[in-house]
């Protein structure tokens, strides 16, 4: 999928936002994780306008996050299912839910996520090191990756030289 909104940015966050950055889109993905597959289910569960839903679903299909699956029945019905790429958004969605539960849910979490096998609530997601130790932002070093362009390399070098990046 072409990066239209952030053409000057070599950034994985910007690229991801091109596909899933509209708030209706994340709610559609949430509903897919909650088991919705039909257009009408998404529309009913979200209270979203048909034209907006149609556009967002088409964008998710074009971006490879969901796939359209023809199903038997009257009126040429289709299911929308998460692809592997879409299922890989699960940790990001859980992280947003947990953040919202902590900082934006005045009456407390509206949902609980439980481990199927044990019935226990899942742990809070954390960024961890290679050995599993939780890391704070200041404990992570940022350096150019293989996809970095010269602009990214210069920006990171300048930030490091000014002491704004952890060493």
Image (spheres, grey):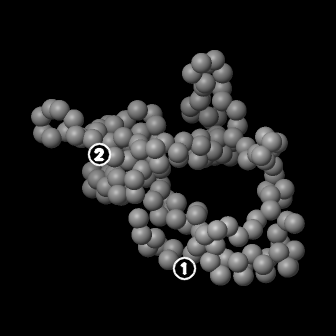
Query: Looking at the picture, does residue 102 appear above or below residue 155?
Result: above
Q: Quadrant of residue 143?
A: bottom right
**Residue that mark 2 sits on:** 68
- Please tell me whether mark 2 sits on a helix, a strand or a loop: strand
The residue under the point 78% across, 78% down is 157
Q: Quadrant of residue 55?
A: bottom left
Q: Which residue is situated farthest in the top direction here?
A: 118
The residue under the point 62% across, 34% down is 109
Q: Report whether residue 110 is seen.
A: yes
- Residue 96: x percent and y percent? 60, 46
Residue density around tag 1, few if under 14, some if 14–19, many if 20 or more, within 10 Å = few
Q: Do the numbered discs 1 and 2 sit on residues whose CB atoms are within 8 Å? A: no
**Residue that mark 1 sits on:** 8
Q: As rendered, which of 75 and 147 lies closer to the eye?
A: 147
- Residue 114: x percent and y percent? 60, 25
Q: Report whether residue 44 is seen.
A: no
Q: In which quarter of the image is the N terminus?
A: bottom left
The residue under the point 34% across, 53% down is 61
């Amino acid at each position: 999928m072409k990066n239209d909104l952030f053409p000057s940015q070599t950034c994985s966050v910007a690229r991801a936002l091109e596909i899933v950055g509209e708030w209706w889109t994340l709610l559609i993905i949430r509903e897919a994780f909650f088991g919705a597959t039909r257009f009408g289910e998404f529309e009913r569960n979200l209270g979203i306008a048909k034209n907006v839903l149609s556009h967002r679903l088409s964008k998710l299909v074009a971006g490879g996050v969901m796939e359209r699956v023809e199903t038997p029945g009257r009126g040429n019905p289709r299911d929308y299912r998460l692809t592997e790429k879409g299922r890989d958004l699960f940790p990001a969605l859980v992280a947003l839910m947990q953040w919202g539960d902590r900082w934006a849910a005045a009456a407390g979490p509206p949902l609980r996520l439980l481990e199927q096998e044990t019935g226990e609530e899942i742990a809070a997601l954390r960024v961890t090191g290679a050995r599993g130790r939780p890391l704070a932002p200041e404990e992570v070093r940022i350096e150019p990756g293989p996809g970095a362009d010269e602009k990214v390399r210069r920006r990171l070098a300048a930030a490091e030289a000014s002491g704004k990046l952890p060493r």
